[in-house]
Amino acid sequence: MAGTHPPSEEVEQYWIYAQGDRQDYYEAHDVLKQKDMTANDIPESDNDTVRELDEEALQHDSPTSLSGKWNVFLKPAEIDDVWGYVTELVKENEIYSAKVTAKYGREEENRGNHVIVVYTPNYFDKEDVFRVRELLRNKCGIEETLYYKPDIYTRKGIYADTAQERGLPGASRYFG
């Protein structure tokens, strides 16, 4: 776990990272591996653009083509405690990986809040995606609606202000 100071105090790094044992994570949570997947594993959607992005993500040959993340926005007074819970869950192999904006990153972007980005390795595996959301609720005290964004959306430049022009209902694949 990188970072010598808690996120609210770290002034030399933009991000602080937490990484677990990725191979063990797949096995412990029975997460689908991309090499074992077919088009039948694509989650259902009524939106043509969502389906096209999902198909593209499945066909892409990158190990991170199916990854995605829950984004949790928190005030500086809350960030250290919640980040501590998240890093414990990473150490326990309950969360795949995570990162948090440090004080430096938050101030560099002139933002009032920090963001914790909690990754899952395969956004097609809705059971794992929502299992992680429940951990954020039950173990980290996150109560507000959370939004899950596949990394392909980020790579394609899909954000809240561009999603509708691309034919998407929003910049996230899941929420709740």
Image: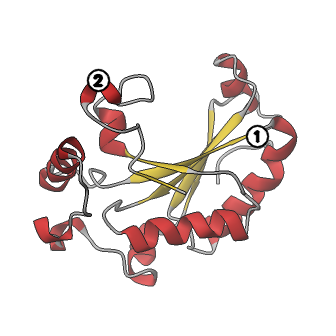
**Residue 36 appears at what percent x and percent y?**
17, 74
Tell me the element at label 2.
helix
Residue 101 visible to the viewer: no
- Specify the quadrant of the image occupied by residue 126: bottom left
In this rendering, position of residue 118 left or right of residue 161? right
Find the residue positioned furthest to the right: 77
Q: Earlier in the sequence, mark 2 or mark 1?
A: 1
Q: Which label belongs to residue 78?
A: none
- 127 versus 68 height, above or below: below
Q: Percent position (x, y) of residue 94?
A: 57, 73
Q: Nearer the viewer, residue 12 or 137?
A: 137
Q: Mark 1 packing: few (<14 Cα in 10 Å), some, or many (20+)?
A: many
94 w.r.t. 30: above or below = above
Which colouring convention does the figure follow?
Answer: secondary structure
To which residue does mark 2 refer? 165
Q: Quadrant of residue 121?
A: bottom left
Is 133 in front, or is 65?
Answer: 133
Decide if residue 92 is in sight here: yes
Q: In the rendered structure, which amino acid carries the disc numbered 1?
A: Pro
Residue type highlighted by circle 2:
Glu
Mark 2 nearby-residue class (10 Å; few <14, some 14–19, many ≥20): few
The residue where tag 1 is placed is 7
In the rendered view, tell whether residue 171 sits above or below residue 143: above
Cα gap from disc 2 to disc 1, whole angstroms: 35 Å
